Image (cartoon, grey):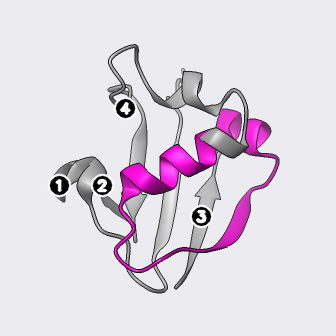
Amino acid sequence: MKITFRTFATFREVIGAREMELTLPPGEKIRDLLENLCNTHPGLREHLFDAAGQIKPYILILKNGRSITSLQQLDTVIDEGDVIAVFPPVAGG
């Protein structure tokens, strides 16, 4: 199945792209997607995960514009055509 993966700010720099079209096996979960991306993009893991292997609390991950915290978090299943977006912390003044 094909999905769109979007990154912003720091994540864009680490991955080297603003948007990627990815082909995933059916039943892939957010956790699987992120793990595979961390394995292929050195430095990404430190930005996403804490020492216990959990997503850092200030990282926002969206599936089709909806936060995965309101879904099944890292166990959220990805479906054909989904758009997964990852946002780093944002500060402003």
Q: CA distance from mark 3 to mark 4?
A: 17 Å
Q: Amino acid at mark 2?
A: Ser
Residue bearing mark 2: 67
Q: Amino acid at mark 3?
A: Phe
Q: Is residue 20 above or below residue 7?
A: below
Residue 5 is marked as 3
Where residue 22 sits: x, y (%)? 64, 72
View extreme (right): residue: 16
Considering the numbered disc 1 on the image, is that residue within a helix, a strand or a loop? Answer: helix
Residue 70 is marked as 1
Residue range highlighted in magenta: 9-38
> Which is nearer the eye, 60 or 44?
44
Q: Amino acid at mark 1?
A: Ser
Considering the numbered disc 3 on the image, is that residue within a helix, a strand or a loop? Answer: strand
Question: Which residue is located at x 39 percent, y 68 percent?
Answer: 28
Question: Which residue is located at x 57 percent, y 21 percent?
Answer: 46
